[in-house]
Each structure stands twice: as C-alpha cells, then as structure tokens.
Amino acid sequence: MGKKVQGVIIVIILMLSLICLWMALRQVPKQAQPIEDAKEGAKVYAQDHTFYLQEGKLYVIRDNKSIEVPGDFSQMKMSHYKEGTYQSKENMGNIYFYYQVDSKLYLVRTSDYQNWTTQELTGQNIGVPAQAKIKQIRISGNYGYIFYIDKDGVGGIIRSTTQGNYWSKVETSFSLDDNCELKFLDTYGMTVDGFLTVPQADGSKCDLYQVNNEQDNPFELVDISGINPTDHNLSYYHMPYYEDNQSNHLIYLEVGENKEDKNPVTFVNYGTWITKEAYDAQKDQEKQKEQEADQEYDQAAEQLDEKIFVKNFDAYQVTDNSVQISKSQAKKIAEKGFQESAKRIAAEGIVDTEEETDKVEEVTPNNYFTRKHNGSDQTYPDKKRKAYVFMKTNEMGNGVAVFVDVTTGKIIGGEAYGD
C-alpha cells in the first residue's frame, strides 16, 4: 500500500473518530450552566439567591450550586416572572416564587431547598381567578397572604394560617382594587406584620389598615384621629416603615394634608399610635428615670453600713478564722443582707420563701452588695474566709445567699441563683 493511500486512510480514521466523539458528547446530559451562561438569562433577585430556566427545567442557585426544582416547567418562560414575587430569606420562614403559564398561576415554595411544593393558585383549592394579576405574595411563619386583581379590576385577598398549605378568602368591609397597596414589614414574628392602604371614594385620601395575624379578620383600621396634634385634616399617603431601634421593633407612619405636604406628622407604633414628638418625650423621660435609678443604686452601695458590710476588701485584713459569733447572731446580720438584696439587686427567695438553709463553709468574698449598677462582678480569692452561708429559695428554685464572716460578723458577699 502506497504512502498516499495510507495518508488518506489515517485522515478518514481521524475524521470518523471526531464524528464519534461529537455524537457521544451530544448524548451527555447538559449540566446546569453557571448563572451568567443560562440560556434564557438568570437574574439575582435576593442576595446570593437566584433561579433560572434551562431546557424546560427550573434551577435555583444557592451557595453557588444549581438545585433543580421538581416539576414540569417546560411551558414557563423567564419573561413570566413578576417583580416582587421571589423571597429567599430563610429566617422569614419560607422560600417561594410564582410564575404564570397562559392564564394559570403557580406557586412554588420550600423551606429547606429539598422538599418542594407546587400549587396552582388558579385551581379550585386556592381560588385565584384565571387571568388575575398578583400584586403581593407573603408567606412568613404560619401566615401567608396573596393579594390579586382579577381581569375586571376587582381585588381580593386570600390568607393561609397553615404555612401556605391551605388558603381561604378574607372577607373585607372595603373594596379592593389596583390602587390599593399591601406591604409587609421586613421582619419575622411580629403581631403587626404589614399594612394595607385603601383609597377613599373621592381618591383624595387613603384609609390605612394594619395586618394583625392574630385576628380572624386580619385587617384593622388605623385610627389616629383622637390624637391628631393639629387642626389639620391629616390623611395617609405613604406606607409605614419599620425600624429596629436598639432591639425595639418600631413602626413609623407619616401623615399629611396632601401628597405634597413637606411637613408630615410622624406617628410611632409604641403599643398604640403616638406622635413621634410624644414618643421622643416619653423615651427621654424613661431614660431620665433609668439614670436616676442608677444613681440611687450607686449611692445606696456607697452608703452601706460599714459595721455590717465589708466595702473595702483590699483593707479587709483578717487571718483568724475562729468562730466569734453565734449562728443566731449571724442570722440577724444576714437579714440585713437579704433586705438590701431585695431593695436593689434581687428579691428572689425573699418573698414566698419555700426553703431556708444555713451552713458554715469556706467562701470567696465578692462585691455582690458593693458593686455599682454598671460595675463588673469581682471576687477576692486571696481572702477566702470561713462564713455562715444563709440561703432563701422560693418555689421556683430562685434564691439569694448571704455570706457572714464567722469571726468578724460582717457580710463579705453573696449571690443570686436560679433562672
């Protein structure tokens, strides 16, 4: 066989090998592509979470990994996604989003990215009308809300108290339409979870309802007419906003005479609605009372009777450990300690005492009675002393102990124990 023929055969073999390799690669199932390479595009909707479509399959991205969502999404398109429908905050109770195919709406949700539920919102079990527009979906803890507008412009709200498993329509005394706004607070576990604005008939004013999860009818009218600080005709034009102020969950509400009002009056939900001015004054009063209480506490610690309480442990130089006072004498002295503890430190064991005990043991003196309000606990291990230890414990297991030095008869510390 000539060299020319051999070369042709080699070329043919190489070509056949390439064709076989190409066909084999076609048979390998395609893996979910990185977010930026998804065929129909992927978009991050909340922090590091996203979802996208690829060849009729729906994937959720979590921790840079693609997780396939069970179900038939062959008819879904990313263009069906509606803004505001995706929530991925695990601390809010559920991860969910919805999509539309033709005139039907579907809700997809999970709480752990492993167990998925897909519900047809337009089916009989849930009852969102076909061709409806979803304005708001919220699933937080046990409670879920879906606010929709039907094809005729009439609004409705359905509610779940079973983590989104079962839904029922909320009957309202007011009419809902596309001009109404339902917004929820970005927090979890609050009784007041959100707010609903309903424009009045003339359209110039809005009524405001708060969402109270604990009520059968969750929408309660917010009425501040009785605490209107001015003679102005105030109305609601802006949704309330939430603020976490030093762990106090506060809700602020601005109201004005019109949408262009440059000086709206701000109210604060502080158990009830009060003006921010009144709220600030109340907080100033509370702060002043706390400061006065701290000063009284510190003054009481400084004014302890030195004949009963050791106040300066550095100067407390006692080496003798012999018993110089009787148990009955020590008990009377300890009562002074119990009274002082109940007055400004801890009252456990003083009221409704269930048990009283006493013993003699070596203790480490401490500043239980002498520390300042914001001071730190201190012990004095180099001054360990033999002491009468008197304890009073209430029926809840909480109590107070007082240490009385067996030699000097002075209170050299104590402790509160229990929950």
Image: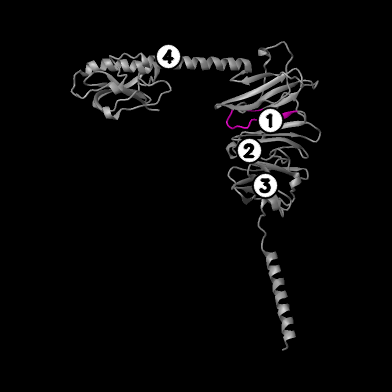
Q: Which mark is residue 51?
A: 3
| Amino acid at dot 2 | Gly
Q: In which quadrant will I find the C terminus?
A: top left
Marks 3,1: beta carbons within 8 A: no
| Amino acid at dot 3 | Phe
* Colouring convention used in this rendered image of the protein: one colour
The percent position of residue 404, horizontal first and vertical second, equals: 26, 21
- Residue that numbered label 2 is attached to: 164
State which mark lies toward you, 1 or 2. Answer: 1
Q: In which quadrant will I find the N terminus?
A: bottom right
179 sits to left or right of 68: right
| Amino acid at dot 4 | Glu
Q: Residue 183 carries which label?
A: 1
- Measured in 3D between alpha carbons, the distance from the residue under mark 4 to the one under mark 2, in whole angstroms, is 53 Å
Can see residue 216? no
Q: Give the range drawn in magenta.
A: 180-194
Helix, strand or loop for disc 2: loop
Q: Which mark is residue 93?
A: none
Image quarter of residue 304: top left
Marks 1,2: beta carbons within 8 A: no
Helix, strand or loop for disc 1: strand
407 sits to left or right of 340: left
- Residue that numbered label 4 is attached to: 296
Nearest the viewer among 247 and 194 is: 247
Q: Residues within 10 Å of mark 3 (few under 14, many from 20)?
A: many
